[in-house]
Image (spheres, rainbow, N blue to C red):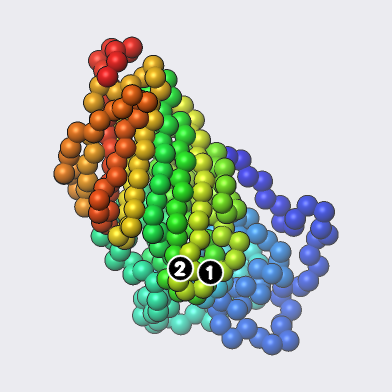
Amino acid sequence: MPHTFADNPPGTPPRTADATAPAAHPPATFADALRQALRLRGLPLQRVCDRLAEQGVRISPATLSHWQRGRSLPERPQSLRAVRKLEEILAVPHDHLVGLLQPHRPRGRARTHGQDVTASRRVFAPGSEVERALGDAFAHFNQDITPLSIHEAVFLGADRCIRRMSVTQVLRAICDGPDRLTLVHQVDEDVSPDVDFTVGCGTLGAVRVEEPLRCVVADILLGRRLRRGETAVVRYDVCFPPGPTPSTFYERRVRTNLREYLLHVSFAPEAVPASCRKYYRHRTDAPREQVARLVIDGSHTAHLYPGKCTPGVHGMSWAWPLHRGAAG
């Protein structure tokens, strides 16, 4: 999905404010200073990330968003290097941003609420593609919002590949403030992650493709900041490019208990699997367990609806007939 970003929105004159000029009230915190510098420079977060990437530093828009809102601070060497580069990109004096960072700040102190990073660690193996795609943002991956229910429909084409999926999630804010849901989708091998998003409930925010990891990272904006306990609904479709080899499974990584999870897979009438099974894995690097056969009904669909959806990996796999055209 191509996205083009400009330094200023179309139809607006270039910013003329001097970001190097001292503010009337000097910022007291790193978040204040970064937010002020971004506003004066007039650069979208994605554009800033693109410029950082050009200099060999990869930081996600979600991470920058958390930094400027004070939800986390740069701590890792890569992050501190990014801050130095940010001072150049945003044209602020040397140490204007770095000087506001506390060098010996204990890790995780900024997270006073929300889901702990261990919720992600329990499901995602160390060094997983999702963690590498998110970078520093993995530590606060959707930490202030949690899904209550997820319904997803997956559609396979006559080429036996997953071509489209439609997802509806009911979310609840764990604390005051969340305004977006971050998604990470991984595609089949040899399939480009340059997918097409269509958002029905919510607004599509930044989209970033991590080609080597076969991942696409996207934000769905909720349109407002939720208060603690409030709920929101997001609905989106993803269309995938064709792949060279048939798809053989689909799975959802769940970090917290869900009230309800439904996976409904539809097969093309001319490409129905010979068999279909559900399975569970407690972590992304764990073997499949609780394997059980699923029925493919007269509408060429199969579904997974666990009575209790606990943290872990819930998936469905299918086996194709040895010869194309053989009905399952």
Q: Would you say residue 142 is visible in this rendering?
A: no
Q: Residue furthest front?
A: 298
Q: Secondary structure at mark 1?
A: loop
Q: Which residue is mark 2?
A: 173
Instruction: Locate the N terminus by quadrant.
Output: top right
Q: Amino acid at mark 1?
A: Leu
The image position of residue 204, as x and y in percent, is: 58, 51
Residue 35, picture quadrant:
bottom right
| Quadrant placement of the C terminus | top left
Q: Is residue 43 above or below residue 5?
A: below
Q: Quadrant of residue 19?
A: bottom right
- Of residue 165 and residue 36, the one placed in the foreground of this image is 165
Question: As rendered, which of 219 and 200 lies closer to the eye?
Answer: 200
Instruction: Decide if residue 42 is on the left or right side of residue 141.
Output: right
- Residue 219 location in percent, x, y? 53, 54
Q: Residue at x 63, y 55 (%)?
A: 47
Report whether 205 appears left or right of 161.
right
Residue 43 drawn at (x, y percent): 68, 61
Q: For the residue carrying disc 2, how many other residues have a C-alpha within 10 Å: few (<14), some (14-19), or many (20+)? A: many
Residue 215 percent location from the top left of the image: 43, 44
Up/down of 286 relative to 322, above or below = below
Give the residue drawn at x 41%, y 28%.
156
Q: Is residue 163 left or right of residue 179?
A: left
Q: How many numbered circles does the render carry?
A: 2
The residue carrying mark 1 is: 226
Label 1 – label 2 distance at C-alpha: 6 Å
The first of marks 1 and 2 along the sequence is: 2
